[in-house]
Amino acid sequence: MNPRSPLSRRTALLGAAAGGLALGSAACGSADQGAGAGATAGADGLTPVKLQLQWVTQGQFAGYFTALERGFYRDEGLDVQILEGGSDIVPQTVLAQGQADYAIAWVPKALASREQGAAITNVAQVFQRSGTLQVSFAEAGVDSVGALRGKKVGNWGFGNEYELFAAMTAAGLDPSRDVTLVQQQFDMLGLLQGDVDAAQAMTYNEYAQLLEAQDPRTGELFTAEDFTVLDFNEVGTAMLQDAVWADSARLGEDAYQEQTVAFLKASLKGWAAARDDAQAARDVVVARGSTLGASHQLWQVNEVNRLVWPAPEGAGVLDPAAWERTVAIARDTRNAEGRTVIAKDPGADACTDEFARRAVEELRAEGVDVTGEGFTPLSVTLNAGGA
């Protein structure tokens, strides 16, 4: 079978589907269909595609690595190259400069880049929930946002702080006067060493680092009971994070639209596979050269699955309320320097559900569980140091 055939057959389907699928949010627009040239197929008949990650190889991106490993991209006529991220790489900028075809980026940061001129569009909201926490030792008594008053509060900055600042503001705290703000490194040493009373952490990474660390009082690993956690999903100031971003101008081309549906279909199928076999997804990530240990990576895949699943409208389909909340916080919340993420609403072309919905419908027709309503997380045992 010609490996390009799935991608080619979709051309006719796109036009038929365009009028029949409603967008998930009035705040987002639809892509204008028009003629244009896409990437040229290689000698093997596959269309080359570059995906830029926002960080290094780890379970956070298990769905994409699983899709690559299991040949889902090839099945859709694509030859996908996954580009690792890092501290000096801004994925949405790489995309906007034409050095990648798609990028994974947090929504607030991508909106800031859009306001600065990056012509990019959110085409799939893979993470349905925020993975950001504020963690304290249980003995500190920080059982609510209001309890942060008078505490040393760590945050990473660099645009990661707005959920926290929105939460403190909503709780009646003035972040510049009622707490002591501490610039936190991207680890948990500040909390473990007592430099901060509450530390920023991701559910799938830094929080696990605490549970992999030894309690010097007992010689045993810390447990969840040793800490209190403020979850911004529960607090009400969660902002959307990992999304797939595409080139806004190229979304006017038929070929790129076709490619985008194919890419999302394979990627979401990869996320479904990572959900259904988290251990296999962990093994794929470890084999790709992650520097994190095996138990830490299984924890990470499991926790990331919690952010993706369940997806009531289908994986990658945007929740309008979550989008509007993210935009409102990005527009109205000020950080320690008095800056907001964006100065105005991002506009209708900042996001579209069109391609994710089409991908979901194709997967559903093939019998893939695209909502994960029955998803049950694993119970993961962490080893010392995440080994």
Image (cartoon, rainbow, N blue to C red):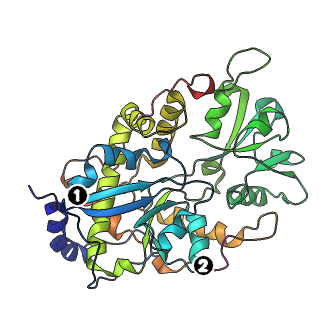
Q: Position of residue 375 (x, y in %)?
A: 39, 38
Question: From the image, which quarter does the C terminus lie in?
Answer: top right
Question: From the image, which quarter does the N terminus lie in?
Answer: bottom left
Q: Which residue is mark 1?
A: 76
Q: Residue at x 49, y 78 (%)?
A: 119
Q: Nearer the viewer, residue 234 or 267?
A: 267
Amino acid residing under circle 1: Glu
Which label belongs to residue 115?
A: 2
| Residue 127 lies within the magenta run | no
Tell me the element at label 2.
helix
Q: In this rendering, is residue 118 above or below 77?
A: below
**How many numbered discs, if any?**
2
Cα distance, mark 1 to mark 2?
Answer: 33 Å
Q: In this rendering, is residue 197 above or below 334?
A: above
Tell me the element at label 1.
loop
Please, what is the dominant secondary structure of the magenta stretch? Answer: loop
Quarter of image, res 256: bottom left
Q: Position of residue 172 (x, y in %)?
A: 82, 58
Q: Which residues are magenta?
A: 341-345
Residue 345 seen in the figure: no
Amino acid residing under circle 2: Glu
- Of the numbered discs 1 and 2, the one sitting upstream in the chain is 1
